[in-house]
Image (cartoon, rainbow, N blue to C red):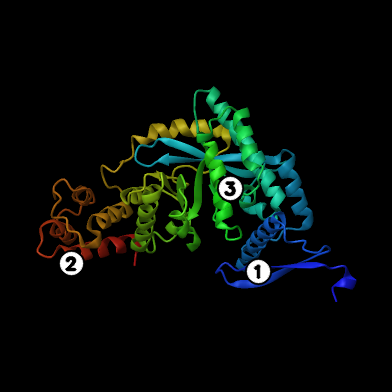
Amino acid sequence: MMEPLGIRSSLSIPISSEKEQLAVVLTVLGAYPNQFETQRMKQFARSLQYRWEQLWVRCSSQQGIAVTEEKSCYLRDRLFNGGLRMYVQPIVNLRTGELLKVEALARIEDVDGRIIEPSGFLSLLGQSELDRLFQMGLEEGLSSVKKWEAQGYFIKLAINMPPTYLINKEGPDWVSGILKRYAVPAENLTVELLETPGIEAKLQDKAIQRYKELGVKIAIDDLGAGYSNFSRLSSFAFNVIKIDQGILRNIYISPLQTFSMVKSVLDMGRDFHEQIIVEGLENDEVIEAVSHLGAQCGQGFGIARPLAPENFLEWKERYSASVNLKSNGKRLVSDLGALAYHWMSTRGGQTLSKYSYHSCLMTAWLNAQGLADTEVAEWHKECHYGPDPIAASYKFTTWLVKRITGV
């Protein structure tokens, strides 16, 4: 049947859904015998599988915005012909306020000045276009770094690398060359990678090792967004772990469950890796809470929204001046921070008997809230001195949770 049609080989690619269940099989037909047996074609197949799984998830979630072919062509043309803008979002030390690095994030600036975010164009790009975007984005990001350096600011840079570019054999040489051209030390660049089911772990590890040999820092992005990521923590020494912002999504609905998730990932990551960054820090309350959970590094709107490069230094000066006004863990400010502090102090059935009641941050917080002579304050005191501190802690925790959730 195939021979009269000129078909000599075929390739079947399983496409999985978001829940890692088989959704559809994509069949590719070839005109030559053994056409899909080479290493290059196997790499093509893995890339194709990854791309189609992305598309399948977007279509299934019904969250995508319909874009006409004409609009799609326009956006791609604009992106690669003068419209690319690399915004930056700061990553800071939550305890000291020190700026650790900035993450470069792609945007399109339309001819009318309107800024188009990645959700409006990334899904329209093919493999080669994503690779090209990475190279253009890194070059623009490094250009900004050199401009800041000329003004006396030495800023480290992080950028997302497409999975397909990771396994591009020419990639490390190109990255090494662009770093040398801009005279930026390799250790000042962090490459952020998403875990990619479509690419074999051994192939990923080999590619990652080539970048590490250059001195480039490697981050695994969105830890907690998929179960496959957790198994990778012990199998490869990533320099940086980024905890997915989705873990914090329900922090005001289920605070204790969220605390447990964050603390578990922090502990797991800290055992293996140099730096743990919590994403999705939307406000000062969330920043205070995760700081009491042990988080040292963070990123999110509560610190700064993505900034145009020309606005970054202004933000840096403002932020540096405001850091001294924050509590820095020396006092409790919010209900969410108070709950995190108490949860950490009593988790696993611990009592507060070994801590001084008078120097306890919670005692000072209750006084500041005008609750010094209430039943709630008595529960807290019992956590320190009472005959049944576990029962008192349960009452106090329940009261705090209701105060946060309103339920």
- Identify which residue is drawn at 54% across, 51% down: 205
Disc tally is: 3
Q: Is residue 128 above or below residue 379?
A: above
- Identify which residue is drawn at 79% across, 54% down: 70
Direction from residue 194 to residue 233 in the image, left or right = left
Front-most of residues 230 and 68: 230
Q: Is residue 189 above or below residue 392?
A: above
Q: Can you identify the residue that label 2 sits on?
A: 391
Front-most of residues 131 and 302: 131
Residue that sits furthest to the right in the current view:
4
Q: Could you say whether the residue bearing mark 3 is in a helix, strand or loop?
A: helix
Tell me the number on the disc at residue 364.
Answer: none
Q: Amino acid at mark 3?
A: Ala
Task: Choose mark 1 or mark 2, whichever is in front.
Answer: 1
| Marks 1 & 3, CB-CB < 8 Å contact | no
Image x and y of residue 209, in percent: 54, 45
Q: Can you identify the residue that label 3 sits on?
A: 207
Tell me the number on the disc at residue 14.
Answer: 1
| Marks 2 & 3, CB-CB < 8 Å contact | no
Q: Earlier in the sequence, mark 1 or mark 3?
A: 1
Mark 1 burial class by Cα count in 10 Å: few <14, some 14-19, many 20+: some
- Identify which residue is drawn at 24% across, 62% down: 348
Q: Earlier in the sequence, mark 1 or mark 2?
A: 1
Image x and y of residue 293, in percent: 32, 52
Q: Is residue 305 above or below residue 342?
A: above
How far apart are labels 1 and 3 at the CA level? 24 Å
Front-most of residues 120 and 112: 120
Q: Please identify the quarter of the rendering in which residue 399 is found.
A: bottom left
Q: Could you say whether the residue bearing mark 1 is in a helix, strand or loop?
A: strand
How far apart are labels 2 and 3 at the CA level? 53 Å
Front-most of residues 279 and 253: 279
